[in-house]
Amino acid sequence: MELIDTHCHLDGKSFVHDLGPVIGRALAAGVTTMVAIGSGDGPPDLSAGIRLAEAYPFIYATVGVHPHEASKADDSTWPELRALASHPKVVAIGEIGLDSHYNFSPPDVQREVFVRQLEIARDSALPIVIHTREAWDGTFSILESHWPANGPGGIMHCFSGGPAEAERSLAMGFHISFSGIVTYPKAVEVHEAARIVPLDRILIETDSPYLAPVPYRGKRNEPAFIVETARRLAELRGEEFETFAFAASANWRRLCLPETKAKG
């Protein structure tokens, strides 16, 4: 069995004292690959994920400015982000997008920073990792205007919508990534969305240290817990656990690893 945690924040304070044991537990649970999201605390430090990817052969990285930190971006951010996008272990630009729940950065700044990063991703031929919270219409509008449907593709990270949002995302060429939310009994819309996503377009993640799945809900999340998310998704979809896990891992490799793309 192989599992890939396609989205985890291992650089933060939550893991500063026990990152080694956390990684060890993930490997023991069957997690062969982890993707360290490189947004960190925002500019000027854009290398949080890369540092982890350079330290561990089974960790890959993304680079990007999270909508929460969009107001920290300045003229120096964009050339640095372009340069980091060419790092051999950077597999995507993200997480990027819009967040209307907190509005830690002004909405107009979020939109401007989002568009700038879509341009960099397009020019770098890298997929994008989308964060959208209470901002589906705005996110879709920007993507429709600035992201080619036949381009490098992307991931709707930590999917929290229902079937309508899933269908629209799929029509735009995105993969859909489910987190521990799908294990929550009251997340009925997410359950329904999980059932309709084609097997070749589904991904799994922890979003560690956030959103721990049942039975760990309320605790710090970590990559080893992705087993529970994968098990619940397979159950919802009526698929064998091993079949689902294999497919989800293969999906990520096709989308994000250049050597896999080159082999077709």
Image (cartoon, grey):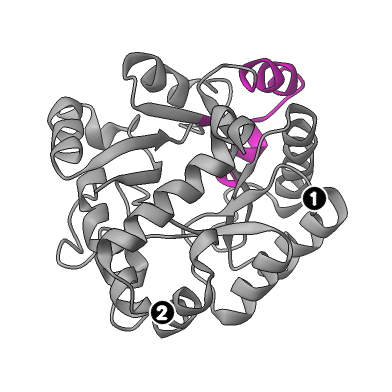
Q: Is residue 55 above or below residue 31?
A: above
Q: Which residue is found at the position 27% from the left and 53% from the top?
A: 226
Q: Does residue 71 belong to the magenta stretch?
A: yes
Going from N to C along the chain, the mark reached first, 1 or 2, is 1
**Residue 72: image location, x then y, percent:** 63, 31
Q: Is residue 233 left or right of residue 78?
A: left
Foreground label between 1 and 2: 1
> Few, some or many C-alpha atoms within 10 Å of disc 1 (few <14, some 14-19, many ≥20)?
few
**Residue 137: image location, x then y, percent:** 73, 69
Q: Determine the secondary structure under disc 1.
A: loop
Q: Does residue 202 belong to the magenta stretch?
A: no
Q: Is residue 17 above or below residue 197?
A: above
Q: Is residue 125 left or right of residue 1?
A: right
Q: Quarter of the image containing the C terminus? A: top right
For the residue pair 68 and 240, the one nearer the viewer reads as 240
Where residue 241 sits, quadrant-wise, is bottom left
User: How many labels, in total?
Assistant: 2
> Few, some or many C-alpha atoms within 10 Å of disc 2 (few <14, some 14-19, many ≥20)?
many
Q: Which residue is found at the position 13% from the left and 39% from the top?
A: 28
Residue 204: tell me if it is visible.
no
Q: Which residue is mark 1?
A: 150
For the residue pair 7 and 243, the one nearer the viewer reads as 243
Q: Which residue is found at the position 69% from the left and 72% from the top?
A: 168
* Region in magenta: 62-85
Q: Which residue is found at the position 66% from the left and 22% from the top?
A: 81
Q: What amino acid does circle 2 point to?
A: His
Q: Is residue 59 left or right of residue 106?
A: left
Q: Which residue is mark 2?
A: 191
Q: Is residue 56 left or right of residue 260?
A: left
